[in-house]
Amino acid sequence: MTKSNSVVIIGGGHNGLICASYLAKAGHSVEVLEARDTVGGGASTAAFAEGYRTSGLAHVLYGLNAKVCKDLKLNIVNPSFTQPVDTISLQRDGDHLTLGRDEVSANSLSVKDLEAYRRFKKEFRGYAKALQPLMMNTPPRLKDMDKKDKLTLAKLGWSLRFGLGTNSMREFLRVGGINIYDVLNEVFDSPALKGAISVDAVLGQHMGPRTPNTVLTYLQRLWGETQTVQSIPIGGMGKVSAMLETTAVEAGVTIRIGAKVAKILVENGRTQGVLLQSGERVDADIVVSNADAKTTFIDLVGAPQLDAMFCHRVNSVRQNGDVAKLHFALNELPAFNGLPTQQLAQRLIIAPDMRYVEHAFNHSKYGEFSENPVLEMTIPSVSDSSLAPAGHHVMSVSATFAPYHLKEDWQQDSRDAFVQRVTETIEQYAPGFSASLVAFQLLTPVDIEDQYNITGGHWHHGELSIDQSFMMRPVHGAAQYQTPIDGLYLCGAAAHPGGGITGVPGHNAAQRILAMGDM
Amino acid sequence: MPTQTDSHPATDFREVLQPSPFQTRIDEQCLVQEWMSWNGYKTARVFDTLASEYFAVRSTCSVMDLTPMEKYRITGPDAMAFLNRLVTRDISALKPRRVTYVIWCNDEGKVLDDGTIFHLSEGDYRLCSQHHQLDWLLLSSLGFDVNIEQETHNIAALAVQGPTSCSVLTAAGVTGVERLKPFDIGYSTLNGIDVMVSRTGFTGDLGYEVWADPTKALAVWDAIFAVKEQGLFDIRPIGLGALDMVRIEAGFIMPGDDFNTAETAVRADRDRSPFELGLAWLVSFKKPYFTGKKALLAESKMLTGRRLVRLSVEGNKTPTDAFLYDSKGGSRIGTIKSCVWSPILKMNVSLADVEFVKGKPPENIWAEIYYQKELEWRATWAKCTMSTKPFWSHPRSSITPPNKF
């Protein structure tokens, strides 16, 4: 440790904590400023009714990066810490589909579909793996490339061409830009199976299965599978953040909660630190923002400090959320038709077929919430009874589509109506569910924006679409974790490769900052 | 078949030029019917002869319709801050009733357009530009509490330029003209009509611009030309042809003619920075951030690769679109962008895009000029000389009060 420059990280979400840990380990003095009263951001465990706690936003862990876990010695694959889960796609007739990493099972599925699933997952995981050199590196610039940019592009090219081989690369090029609807129709017969897989391509996005680009979003999700098993943290997602917090503190990071940043201070094109809402000024050589692009540039830096077209690009980022989060307090476990109780710890989804998912999406295109929403449910109290009073349970639901801009606004009537749509949907699969409700909480994208300081309330701080990915994420001009302001960096989901509890943006940003020799 | 009875056949399939509020008078006086489009307006290139219009600017008094010039009204609490972030020059010290010449750039520090900012009254600005800029202005307004309104069609304007212009306006009844210093704004009446008069222009000569409500346009025109009826002064309407001659003499650049504006440039090296246009004096790095500052700061640390320069060209052959070489038959180093045979200077003057060598202008510049003699093309070489000053300037353009005639 020969040098120690001061770094301020805005936002103690998981990427902020991971970036902080790397920088602190490299010998820098790092302070994380978190606006909320706990770290973790979207990865938290919070009370939503007296005696009931559950994961705040993210509730399924599917892609925490293997290298990050290794580097920071995060022992998450551990039966006392996480419970590996399969995905169960609920069917009204009780013949539920269980989708594992390589196998799918259900009475109704043909031998052809069972075999197709194996081949499909292997093939597509191969594509996802081929993107690895791009995912774990700073996206290469297209102009004024340095050696590293060229190396990243060369590695990516090599990995796509020789890692995949001729036939797979050709197929990858064919499907890479199209939609999951067409691809799944080519591969599978079972509408239920196709519906279930399509959820992983659209959940968190303003996209339906027929939207071009949904193969790419599916690959991003699958990339997580190449890193770690899908699991639910015992005790909620806050456990993961608590572990990251401990790691960061042990690395020497200072963490301040309740410290909301009001302004990023800039002088002569270089950041000087931040100004807190309390009026306190925190000087720093380097400021790293874990916030989304609009919050970082338009709100905190301010358009007058930046070029006009750059601001326009930032302002045009599509980052309006389309997923609502619901938390239900239940006085008994829900009884899903034909689902054994021991399966309630799995990740449960309601998406009976792709048309159902597409129709659900249609509503959001016109500023309405889905009449028949797509649901992803977990019941974390099954594996950790401390989350609810004795005998009671909590259910955590991601419900899509619920657009940020609702035609009628998210006023009380709309909120009640949406909650009713969700409970009625669950009721169809688990009769008696509504009667077991003790309390609930609804977080619309607008609530998520307010409570989690994410403009638009988008899971990924911006759609994971091709035009907002790689060297264009969040926008051209800020896609290498650097920004137009010297000394200001991005480390969150707004940056490449995007959202999800992966830790990759935090990792990549730290590597970039250390490589810049800026400090 | 639809019949042509509608006097405003704007929905016709033909391209229709918009009439100016002065159109009735312009149509009456435009003897040669030589029309062109200026921002969609029907504008005269020549009224009678180019020579008489040119000498009206340099020897007597010329009147030109300025209405088609793009005009934007900028108001609101952040009007000044917005404009200062837009343009490269520091306009924070621009006082009310003053005008300044500005350019503005895109993020890459390449010039989008030039124009003038009129500080009409405290916090109330008018931006005039060569090309349409509303979309860029709106796009640039993110983060500013500012109101932007296009008022091109809401203001009628006449440029009254030439050595006798002050005397003409005074004779027409405008008061206080003689007190206006260059780039000053005054308010007065003309024939009972409220007018704004600014001592601004694009001729390099003594001159004023008169701004009024379009419904009063004809009365303003008539009041000025009534002075001619008194027999004291010659006053001539001029077209864009004569204007182009005098602006080249004065060394004023025309975006779109002398360089590709950044918005229209397709090829990577076809746009130009202020430094490449010889407009470094318009760039202030001391003021708060403005669009393009980062790029321009980086460019300012590098050697100049090329520059738009003023070139006088020997001989009497006009070097229209001529290529420039470092010696007779040598390597190509540039192109003439605008040129004119200057009747008053008796020489060819031009604006030319020239490649620099290691940050310095080339020592020798030769133009290869193609010209016709009785429908036969010939080529000749002419030596060119760079000029750091405008070819034409005269003390009368800046002294206050101007000389009386």
Image: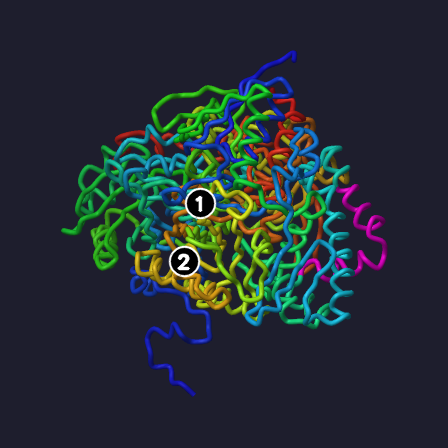
Q: Which residues are magenta?
A: A153-177
Q: Residue furthest bottom?
A: B1
The chain that hosts pointer 1 is A
> Please, what secondary structure does the residue beneath circle 1 have?
loop
> Please, what secondary structure does the residue beneath circle 2 have?
helix
Residue B335 lies, with reference to residue B279, above or below; the image says below
Q: Tell me the kind of residue under disc 1.
A: Ala
Q: Locate residue A400, reporting x and y percent.
A: 49, 59
Which residue is located at x 63 percent, y 54 percent?
A217
Q: Which mark is residue A327?
A: none
Q: Locate residue A480, reporting x and y percent.
A: 62, 36
Q: Which residue is mark 1?
A: A390
Residues A50 and B48: in front is: A50
Q: Locate residue B363, reporting x and y percent.
A: 68, 28
Residue A292 lies, with reference to residue A185, above or below; the image says above
Q: Locate residue A505, reporting x and y percent.
A: 61, 37
Of pointers 1 and 2, the one earlier in the residue sequence: 1
Q: Which mark is residue A436?
A: 2
Quadrant location of the C terminus of chain A? top right
Tell me, yes or no, whether the highlighted magenta stretch contains residue A164: yes
Circle 1 packing at 10 Å, graded few (<14), some (14-19), many (20+), is few
Tell me, yes or no, whether the highlighted magenta stretch contains residue B108: no
Residue A157 lies, with reference to residue B47, above or below; the image says above
Quarter residue A515 falls in? top right
Q: Tell me the kind of residue under disc 2.
A: Ser
